[in-house]
Image (spheres, rainbow, N blue to C red):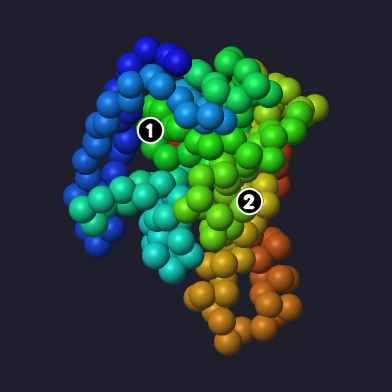
Amino acid sequence: MTNPIEIATFEVKKNDWTDTRINSTSFDGNLEEDQVLFAIDRFALTANNISYCLAGDTLGYWQFFPTTDGYGRVPAMGYANVAASNHSEIKVGDRFWGFYPMSNYLIVQAGNVSASGFSDAVPYRQSLAPIYSRFDNVNANPLYEEAREDQDLLIRVYFSPPGWLMILCLITITLAPTPMSSLVPVLKPALPSPSQLSNAVRRDALV
């Protein structure tokens, strides 16, 4: 159990992105069995977030963090600390990389727990792409450096499997008649290297 908190989440109208709101809900601090409360403190804001909105219904991105009244919660890749845990193998203070809403807190149902991380096992997510339900423990990542989280955020957005999956899905939707083999030579030169992204990263692109 933790103290009662207010969960504030940024939402956009699915059919009118100029219509936004902050949806606030109260959490009494009582976690159910295997639930984990994340305190989200950092995420990347890139063109990918627009892609998630654009393909929100087609590829199911609106379904990861469902809400009401025709609004959607924009997903973002980022970092969060465990603020409270009702799972014996997940400790308060552990830090995780994953797919979060633009919010200050997120409650998940931990499943498939290992030293490297866990998945959100909430029932409605079981029909969605499992790669987006995975939360990676930074302690299991030998390349993780707290001081380089800003650079890491942008690099991982585009060079991690979820980033590539988003790119490939959009190519499939937009250029379905075009053979994928003919696109590869065109796509490769356009993608920046990790070092280029690291040098170009700007703090004002991060939240």
Kindly check if marks 2 and 1 are in contact, taking CB atoms under 8 A apart as contact. Answer: no
In percent of width and height, residue 176 lies at 56, 82
Q: Earlier in the sequence, mark 2 or mark 1?
A: 1
Query: Local crowd at mark 1 within 10 Å, few (<14), some, or many (≥20)?
Result: many
> Where does label 1 land, which residue?
103
Q: Amino acid at mark 2?
A: Ile
In percent of width and height, residue 18 lies at 21, 51
At 57% across and 44% down in the image, what residue appears?
121
At 41% across and 22% down in the image, what residue appears?
30
At 31% across and 48% down in the image, what residue appears?
67
Q: Amino acid at mark 1?
A: Ser
- Would you identify the image quadrant in which residue 151 lies? top right
At 58% across and 49% down in the image, what residue appears?
132
In percent of width and height, residue 61 lies at 45, 56
Kind of element beneath mark 1? loop
Residue farthest toward the top in the current orientation of the protein: 3
* Badge number at residue 185: none
| Front position in the image: 181 or 53 | 53
- Using the numbered discs, state the Cα–Cα distance from disc 2 to disc 1 in whole angstroms: 20 Å
| Front position in the image: 88 or 15 | 88
Residue farthest toward the right in the current orientation of the protein: 142
> Where does label 2 land, which residue?
131
Residue farthest toward the front in the current orientation of the protein: 33
